[in-house]
Image (cartoon, rainbow, N blue to C red):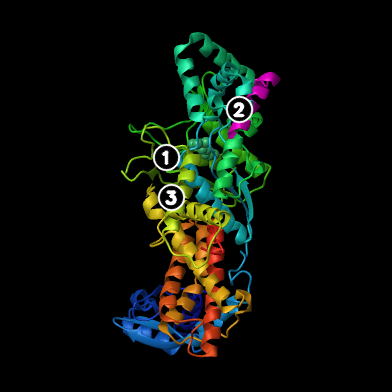
């Protein structure tokens, strides 16, 4: 569906070409929303400077050449040379009407489909997932859904931390508590934080254990079958836990999407070799390092990316370089989006710089770090339990559902629900609340995890949006009409009808921007705007009790278009929409 801003941009550009010659036809028409009209074209001001003429005169000349009769009902030059444009009700209604017959709500598929890796979640084996992982899981999943909807070939990639030196001590700890404890799901193993800490404490305090751990790392890296088997036991315990969390959240990640650090182990040596052959990696202080241009420390000294430590071991960075090379050479991807905490920004900048020097990344193959801001508690500090431990994610999500239940029981419902209905709804509300709260702020800004605010049915929250969809569905139930049978025609009378219909036309731009910039909050904000416009409409424009049949048909069609827009938008964000609430 055409965004009015785009439609008018093309028309103003045509007018520029006609008035001032073809070389002006691609100037930015500077179209902005305005409080005086629907939109304002402000190009006359910069253009007047270029032409050495008065801005108002330039604006008048643009208007004289403007062909917008089918789209715009009123054009007016105001102030120093703004062009105010008021869209015609007929055009808005016709465009809104078109969405009723289109599965994609008029959102075009991309003209340039790409193969895109979206790397997200990426928790660590044998460690508790923390709220940072929660956020990258939620945001990454939304990005993956949005890009797939736009027609890209999306590869979901869960870059689990399942390799490296800590596994020596973790395997020895597993042997100490007994494998059967892991099989039973005993808390000595399944409480990952406690398991990790116990291993750490022994490693630091027990020389014999530390020695065993070190030889275990060597055995692991050498591919010793029994060691690999034990390692797999640990990986499986963690995977079960990750999947439980993913199931709770309703994200699209599966076991097949896991391509952990261990996957790249066999590719490290050849990756390093290539970097050495290309003269990018050099020995410095016994370690093999790359020095990407432009990265310097406090004293101006060049900063290294350590590729092989002096003891011969490889690094986190080495794995990331091997990963990029694999994605380029073997997976042939066009774009890689790393949905990872902002604290790793420098790491990725430097790794990407090395990969560019190696020729793996270039104008055709791009990598970007979609930074995720920290999640803070209501006290403004990093979220921890009262005991100062990191919060166990599954418990946090359970608490969300519990609190959603209390909030749900406190509001009126238009149906009686049995216990199973209630539980299903409350789960959706709890997860919708957590997810929308994460998604509605710019992903790179810090964000305060506040149950009370996110679970409210008022304000910019998941439950408010879910409630809006349920409220529309209840109108259709009461009216005995199916939404897909509400086909209008849409006629705009009341200003709230017009504002709602106009809002509906923005979905294409919202989805496109969210996908292009990997910024789901753009879609989250848009959906909220639609719900708000709907609320105003709902308060002002009776639907089933409309004054006449034509108005009722039009309003039902508006409701149907709104419902589909909200459900589609929320689904792309991964926020479920219960049928009834
Ligand atoms: N390619 C990457 N380095 N991705 C990010 C991995 C995140 C890491 N496992 C962590 O928990 O911090």
Q: Residue furthest right?
A: 225
Residue matched to label 1: 343
Q: Given this view, does label 1 or label 2 mark the residue nearer the observer?
A: 2
Provide the residue span drawn in magenta. 222-238
Read off the residue under disc 3.
403
Estimate the spatial distance between the alpha carbons at disc 3 and disc 2, rounded to whole Å.
Answer: 33 Å
Closer to the camera in the image, 330 or 254: 254
Image quadrant containing the N terminus = bottom right
Provide the secondary structure element on which disc 3 rests.
Answer: helix
* Residue with the mark numbered 2: 234
Residue depicted at x 57% and y 69%: 564
Which residue is outermost to the top? 208
Number of numbered labels in the structure image: 3
Q: Position of residue 346 (x, y in %)?
A: 43, 39
Alpha carbons under labels 1 and 3: distance apart: 31 Å
- Residue 124 spot, x, y in % from top left: 53, 34
Q: Is residue 286 left or right of residue 243?
A: left
Q: Position of residue 184 (x, y in %)?
A: 62, 27
Q: Which residue is pictured at 44% across the width and 76% down the height? A: 538
Q: Is residue 430 found left or right of 157 in the rendered image? A: left
Dominant secondary structure (helix, strand or loop) of the stretch shown in magenta: helix
Q: Please indicate, yes or no, whether residue 305 appears anywhere in the rendered image.
A: yes
Sequence-wise first label, 1 or 3: 1
Q: Is residue 426 above or below residue 387?
A: below
> What crowding class fits label 1: few (fewer than 14 Cα within 10 Å), some (14-19), or many (20 or more)?
few
Horizontal and vertical percent position of residue 265: 63, 29
Neighbours of disc 3 within 10 Å: few (<14), some (14-19), many (20+): some
* Residue 357 sits above or below residue 57 on the image: above
């Amino acid at each position: 569906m055409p965004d009015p801003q785009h439609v008018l941009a093309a028309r103003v550009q045509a007018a520029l070409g006609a008035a001032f010659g073809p070389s002006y036809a691609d100037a930015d028409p500077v179209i902005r929303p305005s409080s005086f009209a629907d939109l304002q074209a402000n190009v006359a001001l910069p253009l007047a400077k270029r032409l050495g003429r008065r801005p108002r005169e330039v604006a008048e000349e643009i208007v004289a050449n403007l062909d917008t009769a089918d789209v715009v009902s009123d054009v007016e030059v105001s102030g120093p040379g703004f062009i105010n444009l008021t869209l015609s009700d007929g055009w808005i209604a016709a465009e809104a009407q078109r969405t009723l017959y289109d599965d994609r709500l008029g959102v075009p598929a991309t003209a340039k489909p790409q193969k895109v890796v979206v790397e997200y979640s990426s928790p660590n084996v044998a460690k508790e997932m923390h709220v940072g992982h929660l956020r990258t899981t939620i945001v990454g999943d939304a990005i993956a859904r949005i890009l797939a909807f736009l027609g890209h070939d999306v590869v979901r990639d869960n870059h689990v931390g399942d390799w490296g030196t800590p596994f020596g001590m973790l395997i020895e700890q597993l042997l100490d508590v007994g494998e059967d404890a892991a099989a039973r799901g005993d808390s000595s193993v399944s409480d990952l934080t406690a398991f990790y800490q116990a291993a750490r404490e022994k490693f630091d305090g027990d020389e014999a254990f530390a020695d065993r751990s070190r030889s275990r790392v060597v055995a692991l890296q050498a591919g010793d079958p029994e060691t690999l088997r034990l390692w797999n036991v640990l990986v499986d315990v963690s995977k079960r836990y990750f999947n439980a969390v993913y199931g709770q959240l309703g994200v699209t990640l599966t076991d097949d999407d896991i391509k952990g650090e261990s996957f790249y182990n066999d590719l490290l040596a050849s990756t390093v070799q290539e970097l050495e052959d290309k003269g990018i990696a050099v020995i410095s202080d016994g370690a093999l390092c790359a020095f990407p241009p432009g990265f310097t420390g406090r004293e101006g000294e060049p900063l290294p990316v350590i590729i092989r430590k002096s003891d011969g071991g490889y690094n986190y960075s080495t794995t990331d370089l091997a990963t990029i090379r694999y994605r380029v050479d073997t997976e042939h991807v066009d774009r890689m989006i790393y949905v990872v905490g902002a604290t790793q920004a420098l790491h990725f900048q430097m790794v990407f710089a090395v990969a560019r020097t190696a020729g793996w990344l270039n104008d055709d193959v791009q990598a970007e770090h979609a930074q995720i801001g920290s999640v803070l508690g209501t006290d403004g500090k990093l979220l921890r339990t009262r005991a100062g431990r990191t919060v166990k994610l599954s418990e946090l999500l359970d608490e969300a559902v519990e609190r959603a239940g209390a909030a749900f029981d406190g509001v009126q419902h238009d149906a009686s629900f049995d216990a199973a209905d209630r539980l299903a709804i409350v789960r959706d509300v709890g997860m919708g609340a957590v997810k929308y709260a994460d998604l509605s702020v710019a992903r790179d800004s810090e964000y305060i995890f506040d149950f009370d605010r996110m679970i409210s049915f008022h304000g910019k929250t998941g439950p408010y949006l879910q409630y809006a969809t349920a409220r529309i569905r209840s109108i259709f139930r009461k009216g005995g009409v199916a939404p897909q049978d509400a086909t209008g025609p849409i006629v705009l009378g009341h200003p709230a009808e017009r504002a709602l219909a106009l809002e509906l036309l923005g979905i294409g731009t919202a989805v496109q921007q969210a996908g292009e910039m990997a910024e789901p909050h753009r879609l989250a904000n848009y959906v909220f705007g639609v719900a708000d416009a709907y609320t105003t409409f709902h308060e002002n424009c009776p639907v089933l009790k409309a004054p006449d049949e034509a108005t009722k048909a039009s309003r039902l069609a508006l409701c149907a278009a709104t419902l589909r827009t909200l459900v589609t938008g929320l689904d792309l964000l991964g926020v479920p929409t219960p049928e009834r609430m």
